[in-house]
Structures are given as C-alpha cells and as structure tokens.
C-alpha cells in the first residue's frame, strides 16, 4: 500500500498560469502541496485542450479567480496519496474527471444521475474538501479549474475525481475521454439511447459533435446530418459517419424546414453541441413532432434562457440536458476506455495537433481560430 500524504512533501513544478482573463499563459514555477485526506497527487502525462478551458480563460465574469491554472482533460500517474485513500496506489495510471463520483451520496447511490452531491462541478477555483487551493507562488494562492488544473506538471485531485485505467492505455489519446469525446458518446448511448435506423441531426461539428456522429454511426443510425457554418468541418465529418451536411449560411429557409424535408418529418434525435440557446430551440424544432428527442450538450456563454412554444413539447417531443454524457466516472468510464483499447472507438481522428508543454499558448491560439479539434499537450519532457 502507498505511503499516506504525511510522507509526501511540497513539490516545485512548472505550470501554465493565467494571470488575467484572456492573457497569454505564463510558464511559472509553482509550489504544489501534498494531497490532503481522500486526495491524490498526479504526475500529469498529457492534457488535451477543451473549449470550456478557452471560454473560462476569456471570461471576465469572475476576475477574482485569477491567477488560475486551467486544464481538466488529463491522463497521468499517481505520485502520492492522501490519508484514507485505498482505491489508488503510487504508480497507478489515471484519468482526471471534472465531476466526481463519491459512490455514497443520494445521487450516486440512486444510479439515476451522474451529478454527485459531494463532488459536482466545482466553480470557485478551490478543492472540494477544504475549499482551499493546492497551488501557490511565493505564498500567493493560484486558483484551480474544475478542481483539476492539469496544465501543470503535477496536479492534486480528489480521489473521487480520478478513474484508474490500464497501464496499456495510450496516455496521449485516452486523455480525451476525460471530457469532450466521452460527452458525445454518452449523449448518444446513455442519454438518448439512439436506435438503429434512426435519423440524427447534430448542431456543431467540433469534438463533441463529431463524437456524437461516431457514436450514432456505431449505433446504426441511417441518417446523420451535420449542421455547421464552417465548411472545413464537412470533409472531416464524413470520416466520423456524417452522411450529409447543412451550412446555415447557404440556406434560404429556416433550418428546421430543411431538416424536416430531408428526414420526412423531422429527425428522431437532435443534438445541440454548440453552447447556444438559440441552437437549442432550432434543434428542438428540427426533430419529429411526435417523438423527437433533443439533447443539449453545450454550455452557453450568454443568454442562458431557452425559449420555446409549449406546443413543441405537447405532441411528444423531449428536451433533455446532459453533463458529461450522463456517464458516472468510476462506474462507466472503465468500459469506455476498454472500447477504445479494443478499437471499437477511434480517438486518433480527434487529435489534430500534438504540442509540447512549452508551446501551450499555440494550442490556445489554434482553438480560438477554429483550426483544431483537440490539441494534446505533452506535459513531460
């Protein structure tokens, strides 16, 4: 059994620190504390850049949460464990997750939700346990992101926010299951339960949208329509299973009318992967009036209210929300990892760039400019 946290010491490591909203990340020497009770400290191997990192980095809504270390899609190796941790040992390979699973609260015990009451989405830049940070520079606290902060050579996470994986899993690809790719697959397989022969429409062909497409193809959907105003994504979409495309900029009529004509009355399943509440309304209008289901996966930057006419639901439509694709991290992710290792799920196509840690700002620029899907940042030399 691994040594407890009291045997671990404060480490000094390199981290990419955002000192203010939208400011280029600065590579700094930071101090990272030993893991507290029920925490583990991880040597981060790879961390992929997610759109939500960009959104929160640019946001001026919470200026008090800077300086801050972003990153949450990560793979790594357990370096030390805190008091009370029995699930992990030093040397274990893990994925970090931005929502945890304590396996003891009402929500976890019910099996009906993946929103753990103890380890849900952390929004205040601190750890779940004692509401403090584990990073500092010369005594100044550095805030966390989603209680992970994987743009650092080492990170401390709650043991409930990590999933043990096989040591044979490729660190530089399996990290994608920490958020975006898993979200898309879960929306199709777990939330919507897409049926064979169905018609699917996807709004937004980023990593999440393409994950939806691959998952729908594996489920046997007969029609997978991609909606995006970036024509560069269309060719990429074909390799993930998209069968036809709509560019809203090229349409002279409302998108729902186009889709209803293409699908003989509306899609069976509609997925909103943009993070725009207007797109949620459009997605709902585009699915079948009798039984269509719309799943929303994106997080809106502005205008969080969804507007719809009650008649959209009266005839039998369903609008469902989804966080992390409905997956319960510890319960469900190991089987998803295994599907990747068995080549049932292909991750390579999502990675457009492999970047060394020193060049992390390049990854941020690529995503801001819409020139990448996932950039995998290799944290160790």
Image: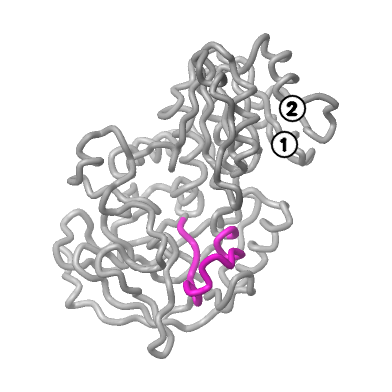
Along the line of sight, which residue is nearer the eye, 336 or 138? 138
Q: Which residue is mark 1?
A: 228
Nearest the viewer among 183 and 271 is 271
The x, y position of residue 371, in whole percent, is 72, 52
Question: Looking at the picture, does residue 4 appear above or below residue 293?
Answer: below
Residue visible at 43% across and 73% down?
Answer: 143
Q: Examine the rendered structure and indicate whether residue 299 appears above or below residue 264.
A: below
CB of mark 2 within 8 Å of CB of mark 1?
Answer: yes
Which range of residues does the magenta coloring cover?
Answer: 54-72
Specify whether residue 57 is painted magenta: yes
Q: Which mark sits nearer the N-terminus, 2 or 1?
A: 1
**Residue count near mark 1 (Cα–Cα under 10 Å), binned few <14, some 14–19, many ≥20:** many
Q: Which residue is mark 2?
A: 245
Dot 2: element: strand
In space, the residues marked 2 and 1 are separated at their CA atoms by: 8 Å
Q: Residue furthest front?
A: 310
Left or right, residue 47 beside residue 9: right
Looking at the rendered structure, the secondary structure element under dot 1 is: loop
Q: Residues within 10 Å of mark 2 (few under 14, many from 20)?
A: many
Residue 310 in the image: state x and y as whole percent. Answer: 54, 23
Query: Label for residue 78?
Result: none
């Amino acid at each position: 059994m691994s040594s407890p946290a009291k045997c671990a010491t404060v480490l000094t490591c390199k981290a990419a620190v955002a000192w203010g909203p939208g400011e280029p990340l600065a590579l700094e020497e930071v101090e990272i504390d030993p893991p507290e009770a029920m925490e583990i400290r991880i040597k981060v191997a790879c961390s992929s850049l997610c759109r939500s990192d960009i959104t929160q980095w640019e946001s001026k809504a919470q200026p008090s949460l800077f300086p801050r270390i972003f990153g949450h899609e990560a793979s790594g190796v357990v370096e030390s464990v805190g008091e009370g941790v029995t699930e992990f040992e030093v040397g274990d390979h893990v994925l970090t997750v931005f929502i945890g699973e304590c396996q003891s609260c009402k929500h976890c015990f019910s099996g009906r939700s993946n929103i753990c009451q103890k380890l849900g989405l952390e929004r205040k830049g601190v750890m779940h346990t004692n509401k403090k940070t584990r990073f500092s520079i010369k005594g100044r606290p550095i805030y966390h992101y989603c209680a992970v902060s994987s743009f650092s050579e080492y990170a401390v996470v709650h043991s409930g926010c990590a999933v043990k994986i096989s040591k044979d899993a490729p660190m530089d690809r399996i990290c994608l299951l920490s958020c975006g790719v898993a979200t898309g697959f879960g929306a199709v397989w777990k939330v919507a339960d897409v049926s064979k022969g169905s018609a699917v429409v996807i709004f937004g062909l980023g990593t999440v949208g393409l994950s939806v497409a691959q998952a729908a193809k594996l489920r046997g959907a007969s029609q997978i329509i991609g909606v995006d105003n970036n024509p560069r994504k269309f060719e990429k979409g074909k390799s993930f299973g998209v069968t036809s495309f709509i560019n809203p900029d090229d349409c002279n009529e409302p998108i729902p009318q186009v889709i209803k004509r293409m699908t003989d009355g509306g899609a069976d399943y509609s997925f909103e992967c943009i993070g725009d509440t207007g797109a949620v309304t459009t997605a709902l209008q585009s699915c079948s009036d009798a039984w269509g289901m719309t799943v929303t996966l994106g997080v809106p930057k502005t205008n969080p209210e969804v507007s719809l006419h009650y008649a959209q639901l009266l005839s039998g439509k369903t609008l469902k929300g989804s966080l992390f694709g409905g997956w319960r991290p510890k319960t469900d992710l190991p089987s998803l990892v295994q599907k990747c290792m068995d080549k049932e799920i292909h991750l390579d196509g999502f990675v457009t760039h492999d970047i060394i840690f020193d060049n992390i700002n390049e990854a941020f620029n690529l995503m801001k400019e819409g020139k990448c899907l996932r950039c995998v940042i290799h944290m160790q030399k």
